[in-house]
Amino acid sequence: MDFELTYWHWWIVGMLLIVLEVFAPSAFFLWMGISAAVVGFVVLIAPDMGWEYQFMIFAVFSIVSIALWKRYAKTSTESSDHPTLNRRGEQYVGRTFTLDEPIVNGMGKIRVDDSTWKISGDDCEVGAKVKVVGIDGTIFKVECE
């Protein structure tokens, strides 16, 4: 029994790889799926091509397209209009607050909107103004004004 790969076999493989990309997003299977579709078009144009050459074209297209994508993704930096959206603490850097509790031995707490944050900085009295100058994990670094 002799099995022959045709263009629609490659298109099915391409669609399956693209569907797999939906469940495992990494832009890896996407490029392999596109490569399979390209091989399908090549086989449509040259239907007598052997399966060895088809797999070789698929491998080359997959490797080249994935490498180009990785290179592009590494060098491309997209700017966002909300760069601190998922980094809540960084949204407060530069803001000034009034202390409800003193900073003692370099540590204290501050009430910000509806939450309480730990702060570190020079000792300050209740009612002093502090400016958030940085963040270390979940602790604000502050300076007394």
Image: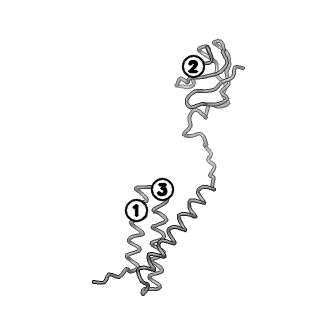
Could you tell me which residue is drawn at 55 percent across and 24 percent down?
117
Q: Nearer the viewer, residue 113 or 40?
A: 40
Q: Residue tagged by mark 3?
A: 26
Secondary structure at badge 1 equals helix
Q: Residue tagged by mark 1?
A: 19
Could you tell me which residue is drawn at 30 percent across and 84 percent down?
2
Up-down: is 70 above or below 48?
above
Q: How many marks?
A: 3
State how far apart marks 1 and 3 are (Cα): 12 Å
Earlier in the chain: of badge 1 and badge 3, it is 1
Up-down: is 142 above or below 123?
below
Q: Is residue 61 left or right of residue 91?
A: left
Locate residue 115, reporting x and y percent: 52, 25
Give the position of the N terminus as an image quadrant.
bottom left
Residue mark closest to the camera, 2 vs 3: 3
Q: Residue tagged by mark 2?
A: 109
Locate residue 30, reporting x and y percent: 47, 63
Picture quadrant of residue 13: bottom left
Give the position of the C terminus as an image quadrant.
top right
State how far apart marks 2 and 1 are (Cα): 49 Å
Pointer 3 local density, CA inside 10 Å: few below 14, some 14–19, many at least 20: few
Could you tell me which residue is drawn at 56 percent across and 23 percent down?
118
Secondary structure at badge 3 equals loop
Secondary structure at badge 2 equals strand
Kindly identify the amino acid type of the residue bearing the numbered disc 3: Ser
Kindly identify the amino acid type of the residue bearing the numbered disc 2: Lys
Most extreme residue toward the left is 1
